[in-house]
């Protein structure tokens, strides 16, 4: 006999729900390579030519993306709930992201090629499509995953995302970045495929690589994961009725008090945690002067730690519950951030001087503060992805199954409507105190606020409280 899903319907087969995890495995490497480790730092430092101005422009970009998604995500979720289909939205948004990511190749140093502002517009478009894909992909989880396995399935999805990021970073490192810098026997003498490092082609290639990966790994989801049954409403009717549903859901949200508290707390803790990952490489490159190759190795190892955290976190989620797992992840992430910012170029634990002398012969992470930052960040990545996974499974456990996509639209909204907050807080505190450390430290406040809000959330599934015509 087939197992029941969280929605109370027949769960998908193992092929169906494991194919669903490939949707995340397809999408996340773009974020890892482009946003966190390679392209955004390249854009800020080399395309814009001023790290401070580049970081500010990217922060404003994130804010604008958040505003657009705030308007779109709940409406699109309501349309899909009315129409019943989610996979067409996933397919359409992935195709758009693939085209946009390929165009990043034409973003040249010094503002050449596409130019600074067209590139920012392109990044906004890709970011919006990324979030739309995420909304509809997440909304499939309650109906396809067996109820007792929802945590580990969510964790496997995040693990696959980090496996993809790890694999692509390893390829870029060996094929394009290390050649010419290292005499190791397993490294080619020159970059493969004629990649020219002087033109930063090893930075620009990550967009097309992520695009090809995204296209191929989305196929299992589209082919083997069952979708909802299409409704009788056309797109125009579904949009009109969906808009009505959005307003009804927002008006009724105070009646869904438990979900409202959760979404409110998530606005803060997810923004703080994502902020640490987003600015972690910037902080390290500014504090320790890490180059592209060092950041690639750093990202490679960090993705491996995140992959392990995603899988182990899923097991913890199913054993102790999503709320307890999430509290653990947020609490430990906050404590680890306190430790992370205690390292500077020649000191550890805020005030202990240790100098910058090498502590081993490996050509990267040579000083004690660098090595300490590298190791500590692995623990942050472990609990960060545990938190991401548990935040999604907790939303699945709280949402009424009949309104899953609408509430996952609000879930996406809670993670993006304040997307400007972490960059704004980091930038403001950095300016006030003229210190990168102060900027990173400000993120602890966001995580603490989210943790306090989470204490008032009950881990129980809500029921539909208003009549839907």
Image (cartoon, rainbow, N blue to C red):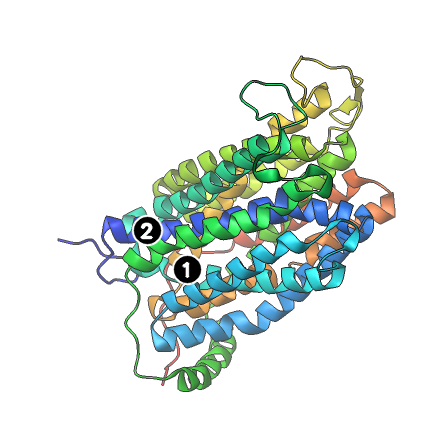
- Residue wearing tag 1: 137
Residue 234 drawn above or below residue 158: below
Residue 43 drawn above or below residue 7: above
- Residue wearing tag 2: 19
Is the residue marked by circle 1 packed among few (<14), some (14-19), or many (20+) residues within 10 Å?
Answer: many
Q: Nearer the viewer, mark 1 or mark 2?
A: 2
Q: Nearer the viewer, residue 327 or 302?
A: 302
The spot of residue 354 in percent (x, y) is: 78, 17
Picture quarter containing residue 193? top right
Q: Is residue 452 at all visible to an observer of this figure?
A: yes
Residue 116 relative to residue 397: left or right: right
The spot of residue 314 in percent (x, y) is: 39, 42
> Looking at the rendered structure, which numbered label has been put on residue 10?
none
Disc 1 is placed on an element classified as helix
The spot of residue 220 in percent (x, y) is: 33, 53
Q: Give me the residue at 69% from left, 54% from top.
A: 107
Q: Give me the residue at 66% from left, 55% from top.
A: 106
Q: CA distance from mark 1 to mark 2?
A: 11 Å
Residue 169 drawn above or below residue 84: above
């Amino acid at each position: 006999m087939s197992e029941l899903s969280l929605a109370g319907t027949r769960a998908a087969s193992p092929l169906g729900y494991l194919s669903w995890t490939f949707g995340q495995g397809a999408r996340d490497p773009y974020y890892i390579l482009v946003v966190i480790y390679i392209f955004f730092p390249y854009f800020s430092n080399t395309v814009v030519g001023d790290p401070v101005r580049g970081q500010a422009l990217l922060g404003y970009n994130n804010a604008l993306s958040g505003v657009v998604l705030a308007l779109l995500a709940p409406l699109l979720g309501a349309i899909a709930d009315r129409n019943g289909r989610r996979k067409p939205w996933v397919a359409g948004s992935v195709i758009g992201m693939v085209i946009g990511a390929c165009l990043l190749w034409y973003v040249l140093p010094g503002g050449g090629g596409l130019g600074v502002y067209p590139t920012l517009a392109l990044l906004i478009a890709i970011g919006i499509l990324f979030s739309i894909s995420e909304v509809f992909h997440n909304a499939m989880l309650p109906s396809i995953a067996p109820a007792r396995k929802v945590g580990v399935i969510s964790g496997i999805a995040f693990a696959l995302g980090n496996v993809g990021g790890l694999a692509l970073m390893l390829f870029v490192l060996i094929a394009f970045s290390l050649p010419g810098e290292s005499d190791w026997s397993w490294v080619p003498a020159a970059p493969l495929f004629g990649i020219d490092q002087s033109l930063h082609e090893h930075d620009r290639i990550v967009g097309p690589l992520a695009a090809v990966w995204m296209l191929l790994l989305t196929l299992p989801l589209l082919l083997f994961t069952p979708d909802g049954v299409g409704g009788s409403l056309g797109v125009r009717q579904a949009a009109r009725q969906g808009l009505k549903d959005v307003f009804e859901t927002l008006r009724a949200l105070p009646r869904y008090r438990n979900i409202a508290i959760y979404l409110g707390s998530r606005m803060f803790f997810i923004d703080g945690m994502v902020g640490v990952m987003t600015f972690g490489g910037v902080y390290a490159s500014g504090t320790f002067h890490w180059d592209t190759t060092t950041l690639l190795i750093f990202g490679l190892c960090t993705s491996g730690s995140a992959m392990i955290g995603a899988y182990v976190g899923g097991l913890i989620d199913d054993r102790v519950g999503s709320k307890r797992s999430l509290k653990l992840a947020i609490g430990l992430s906050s404590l680890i951030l306190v430790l992370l910012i205690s390292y500077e170029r020649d000191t550890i634990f805020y005030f202990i001087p240790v100098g910058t002398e090498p502590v081993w012969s490996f050509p990267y992470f040579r000083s004690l503060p660098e090595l300490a930052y590298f190791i500590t960040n692995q623990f942050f990545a472990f609990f960060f992805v545990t938190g991401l996974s548990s935040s999604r499974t907790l939303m699945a456990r709280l949402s009424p199954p009949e309104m899953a996509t609408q509430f996952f639209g609000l879930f996406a909204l809670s993670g993006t409507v304040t997307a400007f907050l972490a960059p704004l807080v980091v930038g403001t505190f950095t300016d006030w105190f003229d210190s990168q450390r102060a900027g990173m430290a400000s993120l602890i406040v966001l995580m603490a606020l989210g943790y306090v809000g989470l204490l008032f959330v009950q881990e129980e599934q809500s029921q539909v409280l208003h009549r839907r015509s």
